[in-house]
Each structure stands twice: as C-alpha cells, then as structure tokens.
Image (spheres, rainbow, N blue to C red):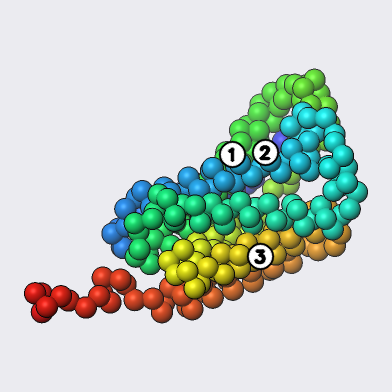
C-alpha cells in the first residue's frame, strides 16, 4: 500500500508542534510556580483532576452510555434512544465534560486542596488541569503523528493498516484520513491547534477560579453550576459541528472557543480573583503583633 510521502515542511511542523504542546505548558507552570512561590503539588492536583475525572471516569462512562461500540460493548436501548435524537446526543456529549471536570475541581478543592485558601491556588489548579490536557491530548497526538510520518516515509506504515483491518476494520478509513492529513499538514493547521489550546487553557483557569470561590464562600456556591453551564456551552458548539447539526468552518469554531475562553477567564479573573485580597495581607495583626 502506497501513501503520499510526508514532506520536510510537514515533518518540521510536526516536530515544532510536539515541542510546543509539551514545552509551553511546562514552561508556564514553572514560571508561575517561581513567580508566586506556589507548591508544585497544587499544579499537580490540577493535572490529577483532569486525569481522574476526564479520562478515567468521564470517557468510559460516557462511551458506555452513548457509544458502547467504541468499548466493544453491545448496543443497548439507552444508546439507541440517545443516538436517534441529535439534540439530546449533542447535549449529553457536551454535558459530560462539564459535569465531570467541574465536579473534579470541586472535589480537589474540598479534599487535596482544602487547606489552600490563597487565591493563587485557583490559577495553579487551572494551569495544571489545562496544561496537562494539552500535553496528554495534543502533545501525545503530535508525537504519534510524527512517528506515523516517519513510518510513511520509510514505507512501513502499511503494516499499521493491515493490523487495523484485522483488529478494527471500521477504523480503516480513519487510518487513510490520518495519512492524507499528514501529507497535507500546514502551518495553518498547527496555528489552529495552538489557538484552540491557548483559549481552552484560559477557560480551564477561569473555571478553576469560579469553582475555587464556590468552595471558599458558601454564598457563591452558585458559581459551581455556572462553571458547568459555561463548560457545556463551549463543548456544545463543537458537538453541534461534529454531529453535523450545524455547518461551521474550523476557524469559526475556534472564534467561538476564543470568545468562550476569554469571557470565562477575564470574567472570573476580574470579578473574583482581582478583587480578592490575599488572605494573609487582609488579616489584621493581633494586639501582640501591633
């Protein structure tokens, strides 16, 4: 099986993408830690939140309910009911990340970070959550695609196709699509991915701020369901496009992500984080200290 060779420009872009998707999140985390003297464990708690609640819990439960065939499970009545109703399918597909990831933040603040009351904790958690998502989803994808490109150019990529034909014949077309994508990969594709991740991380930081203050002040607990709604709305547009309910260009979809991420981040930062005085700075000295 012959596949179009991946050019040197495409190879360079894949290497650059791999470096950016792994290196930038790490650099941001290091700079934030050094600047704010934040413990690395707070950032790692954010990463752990994404790993546990998004990957280990959310995806298997969502797939078992809506897409059982992806897990090798037989089709069932609930999946048939949901998939026969496109708007319900979109709603649930978008709602799962919102509920699980925002609840993950809530659980983290109530358990591992229950003694962390300084406002920087909220941004540290968001950097860990959003940064780890970039590394695990986009970074690993770029490295995988780079390895595929090397195999295509060496003529050994056909072995993957043969394996897929045996193990997952329904995914053969996806393998062809990946090979075609790699041969035509452009700077615009890389730029699109970078823009999307920047504003996705901004959204995660904003969501982390919202849920932090929901935990910090009982009167502001409504910020937790608000974070779920905002998360669902952002993912809902992507789901509407993915399932063909609306037709929207990739760049227009990214504009929506930019707006959602910016509004969530700046709204949470300016209305909550910026107005919140550091607890230690706001405490009055005791008579003995005065």
Q: Residues within 10 Å of mark 1 (few under 14, many from 20)?
A: few
Rendering quarter of residue 113: bottom left
Alpha-carbon distance for marks 1 and 2? 7 Å
In this orientation, which residue lies closer to the viewer: 229 or 169?
229
Report the disc number at residue 60.
2
Is 62 above or below relative to 193? above
Is 259 above or below relative to 198? below
Count of labels in the image: 3
Rendering quarter of residue 189: bottom right
Asked if the residues shown at circle 1 and circle 3 are in contact, with their CB atoms under 8 angstroms apart, the answer is no
Alpha-carbon distance for marks 1 and 3? 22 Å
Please name the residue that numbered disc 3 is placed on. Answer: 229
Residue 275 image point, x, y percent: 41, 79
Report the disc number at residue 136.
none
Residue 76 image point, x, y percent: 85, 36
Please name the residue that numbered disc 1 is placed on. Answer: 56
Rendering quarter of residue 142: top right
Alpha-carbon distance for marks 3 and 2? 22 Å
Residue at 25 percent across and 75 percent down: it is 283
Asked if the residues shown at circle 3 and circle 2 are in contact, with their CB atoms under 8 angstroms apart, the answer is no
Asked if the residues shown at circle 1 and circle 2 are in contact, with their CB atoms under 8 angstroms apart, the answer is yes
The numbered mark, 3 or 2, whose residue comes first in the sequence reads 2
Residue 205 image point, x, y percent: 50, 62
In this orientation, which residue lies closer to the viewer: 212 or 41?
212
Is 105 above or below relative to 118? above
In this orientation, which residue lies closer to the viewer: 86 or 132?
86
Q: Residues within 10 Å of mark 3 (few under 14, many from 20)?
A: some
Helix, strand, or loop for circle 1?
helix
On the rendered image, what quadrant is the C terminus found in?
Answer: bottom left
């Amino acid at each position: 099986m012959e596949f179009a060779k991946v050019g040197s420009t495409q190879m360079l872009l894949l290497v650059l993408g791999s470096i950016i998707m792994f290196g930038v999140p790490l650099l941001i985390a290091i700079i934030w830690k050094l600047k704010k003297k934040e413990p690395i464990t707070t950032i790692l708690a954010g990463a752990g939140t994404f790993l546990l609640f998004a990957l280990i819990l959310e995806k298997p439960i969502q797939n078992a309910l809506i897409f059982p065939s992806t897990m090798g499970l037989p089709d069932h009545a609930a999946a048939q009911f949901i998939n026969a109703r496109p708007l319900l399918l979109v709603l649930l597909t978008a709602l799962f990340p919102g509920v699980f990831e925002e609840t993950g933040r809530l659980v983290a603040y109530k358990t591992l970070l229950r003694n962390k009351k300084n406002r920087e904790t909220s941004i540290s958690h968001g950097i860990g959550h959003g940064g780890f998502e970039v590394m695990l989803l986009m970074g690993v994808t770029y490295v995988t695609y780079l390895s595929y490109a090397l195999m295509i150019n060496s003529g050994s990529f056909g072995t993957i196709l043969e394996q897929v034909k045996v193990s997952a014949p329904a995914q053969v077309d996806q393998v062809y699509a990946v090979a075609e994508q790699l041969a035509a990969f452009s700077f615009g594709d890389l730029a699109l991915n970078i823009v999307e991740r920047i504003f996705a991380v901004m959204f995660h930081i904003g969501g982390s701020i919202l849920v932090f203050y929901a935990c910090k002040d009982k009167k502001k607990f409504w910020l937790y369901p608000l974070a779920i709604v905002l998360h669902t709305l952002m993912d809902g547009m992507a789901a509407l496009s993915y399932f063909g309910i609306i037709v929207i260009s990739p760049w227009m979809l990214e504009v929506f992500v930019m707006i959602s991420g910016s509004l969530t981040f700046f709204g949470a930062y300016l209305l909550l984080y910026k107005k919140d005085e550091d607890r230690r700075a706001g405490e009055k000295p005791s008579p003995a200290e005065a």
